[in-house]
Image (cartoon, grey):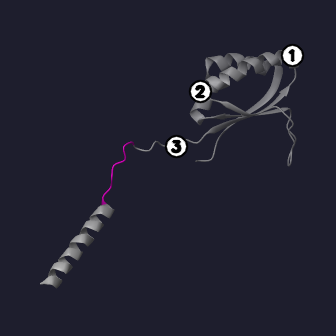
Amino acid sequence: MWIQKSIGAAILCAGLFVAAACTTVAEPEAAAAVVPKAYLIAEIEVVNPEPYKAYVAAAGPIVAAYGGKYLVRGGPAEALEGAPPAGRMVIVEFPSMAEAKRFYDSPEYTEARQGRIENAVSRFILVEGAAP
């Protein structure tokens, strides 16, 4: 009799253990999808330095208003392979591709951008960062 009760108890415990292991506990909040950051990479050859300064002054606050953060803004650049940069290199980090596009297409930047177009030769590239 004692053996039957022990075996029964062992089976019951094993069943409870399996049931607990298979039970899914709901999280208080579902995990939000992680969106990769985006990087605006610009190569800017300034041809009219004095009027270009107005663009630089206007662009900074607009970048910040759309969640952008300058990682590189001018400074020495060196080509390790390929053609050297044709001027200033700028890299701006945005929270996402969507936010970077909102910045670029915004009415504020559209107006400021004209100062860059008139006073520099530029190449802008938007690239999505690696998934976190």
Residues under numbered marks 1 and 2 in contact, where contact means CB atoms less than 8 Å apart: no
In the image, residue 121 lies in the stretch drawn in magenta: no
Q: In which quarter of the image is residue 60?
A: top right
Picture layout, residue 88 above or below residue 31? above
The amino acid on which the numbered mark 3 sits, given as a three-letter code, is Val
> Mark 2 — residue?
102
Seen at 82% across and 31% down, the residue is 74
Front label number (2 vs 3): 3
Q: Which mark is residue 50?
A: 1
Q: Where is residue 130 in the image (x, y as percent from the top left)?
A: 62, 47
Where is residue 6 shown, x and y percent of the image?
19, 79
Residue at the image point whose x is 87% and y is 36% from the top: 76
Helix or strand or loop: what does disc 3 sit on?
loop
**Looking at the image, which is closer to me, 85 or 96?**
96
Say what amino acid the circle numbered 2 marks.
Arg
Q: Mark 1 and mark 2: span between their CA atoms?
A: 28 Å
Mark earlier in primary sequence (2, 3): 3
Q: How crowded is mark 3: few (under 14 residues within 10 Å), some or many (20 or more)?
A: few
Q: Say left or right for 108 vs 1.
A: right
Relative to 57, does residue 15 appear above or below in the rendering? below
